[in-house]
Image (tube, rainbow, N blue to C red):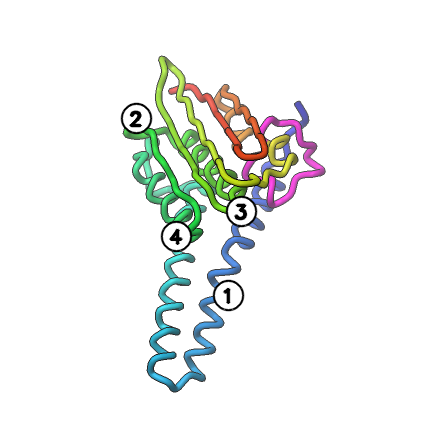
C-alpha cells in the first residue's frame, strides 16, 4: 500500500478529469452556435438546433453525474436513492449508444460514500468499453456490509493497469493522473470507512467490487 495523494492533488486531478470530459459537449455547443449564425437554409438551421439540443443535454447529464460522483452533492441527504444513481449512469451510457446497462439492486438507497463508489466504478467500466458491450451494476446489503459490483464486458476491454493499481491503493501519488484520479478516490473512500476494493480483468471483461460497512 502506497501513501495516498493529498486531498489538494486529488481534487485538482478530479477537476482536470471533469474539464476533459466536458470539453467535447461544450465545444460542440460553441461550434453549433457559430454554424447557426452563418446558416440560412431552414433545413440546415433545424439540424443545427437538433445538434445544439443534443450537446446541451450531454453537458447537463455529465454535470449532474460529476456533481454526485466527485462533489459534495449538497442537494442530497446522507442516503441517496439508488434510482438517482441509476438515472445518472443511464444518461451517461446513453450518449455512447453502444453500451447496454443492466441493473441488480437489492436496496432502495445507499450512503453517499457507497453511491460515489458505485458511480466512479461505473465510470471506469464505461471508459473500458471503447468498442461497446455491457455494463452490469449491482448493489446489495449482506449483514453489516454493502457489496457493490460493476462488470464491464465486451470485445477487447481497454483497461489501463495504472487504474487497477489506483483502485488497489498501489499507485504512487507521483504517478497519479486525471485518468486514474477517480479510481484513487474510490480507494480512499473505501479505506476511510474501513472497506476495500478489488479488481479482476481479462481480455473481454473487467470486474470491480467494493465492500463498505453499512454504518
Residue shown at 39%/74% (left/top)? 48
Quadrant showing the C terminus: top left
Q: Earlier in the sequence, mark 4 or mark 3?
A: 4
* Picture layout, residue 134 above or below residue 142: below
Q: Is 13 displayed left or right of 63 in the figure?
A: right
Q: Residues within 10 Å of mark 3 (few under 14, many from 20)?
A: some
Measure the alpha-carbon separation of dots 4 and 2: 24 Å
Q: Is residue 62 visible?
A: no
Q: Which residues are magenta?
A: 167-185
Q: Quadrant of residue 99?
A: top left
Measure the alpha-carbon separation of dots 3 and 1: 21 Å
- Say whether marks 4 and 3 touch (CB < 8 Å): no
Measure the alpha-carbon separation of dots 3 and 2: 30 Å
Measure the alpha-carbon separation of dots 1 and 2: 38 Å
Residue ID for mark 2: 107
The label number, if any, that marks residue 61 in the structure image: 4
- Residue 209 x, y percent position in the rendering: 48, 26
The number of numbered badges drawn on the structure is: 4
Q: Earlier in the sequence, mark 4 or mark 2?
A: 4
Residue ID for mark 3: 130
- Residue 16 x, y percent position in the rendering: 58, 50
- Residue 202 x, y percent position in the rendering: 58, 30
Measure the alpha-carbon separation of dots 1 and 4: 15 Å
* SS assignment at label 3: loop
Residue shown at 60%/39% (left/top)? 180
**Residue found at the very far right of the displayed protein:** 174
* Picture layout, residue 214 above or below residue 33: above
The label number, if any, that marks residue 27 in the structure image: 1
* Picture layout, residue 214 above or below residue 165: above
- Residue 94 x, y percent position in the rendering: 38, 50
Q: Which mark is nearer the camera, 4 or 3?
A: 3
Amino acid at each position: 500500500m502506497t501513501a495516498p495523494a493529498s486531498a489538494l492533488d486529488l481534487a485538482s486531478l478530479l477537476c482536470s478529469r471533469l474539464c476533459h470530459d466536458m470539453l467535447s459537449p461544450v465545444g460542440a455547443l460553441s461550434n453549433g452556435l457559430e454554424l447557426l449564425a452563418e446558416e440560412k437554409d431552414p433545413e440546415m438551421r433545424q439540424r443545427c438546433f437538433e445538434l445544439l439540443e443534443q450537446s446541451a443535454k450531454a453537458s447537463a447529464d455529465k454535470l449532474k453525474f460529476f456533481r454526485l460522483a466527485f462533489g459534495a452533492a449538497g442537494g442530497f441527504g446522507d442516503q441517496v436513492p439508488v434510482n438517482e444513481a441509476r438515472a445518472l449512469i443511464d444518461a451517461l451510457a446513453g450518449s455512447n449508444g453502444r453500451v447496454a446497462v443492466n441493473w441488480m439492486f437489492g436496496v432502495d438507497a445507499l450512503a453517499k460514500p457507497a453511491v460515489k463508489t458505485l458511480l466512479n466504478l461505473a465510470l471506469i467500466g464505461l471508459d473500458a468499453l471503447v468498442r461497446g458491450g455491457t455494463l452490469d451494476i449491482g448493489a446489495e446489503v449482506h449483514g453489516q456490509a454493502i457489496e457493490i459490483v460493476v462488470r464491464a464486458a465486451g470485445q477487447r476491454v481497454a483497461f489501463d493497469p495504472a487504474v487497477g493499481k489506483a483502485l488497489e491503493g498501489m499507485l504512487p501519488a507521483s504517478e497519479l493522473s486525471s485518468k486514474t484520479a477517480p479510481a484513487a478516490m474510490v480507494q480512499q473512500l473505501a479505506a476511510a470507512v474501513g472497506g476495500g476494493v478489488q479488481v479482476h480483468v481479462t481480455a473481454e471483461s473487467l470486474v470491480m467490487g467494493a465492500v463498505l460497512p453499512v454504518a
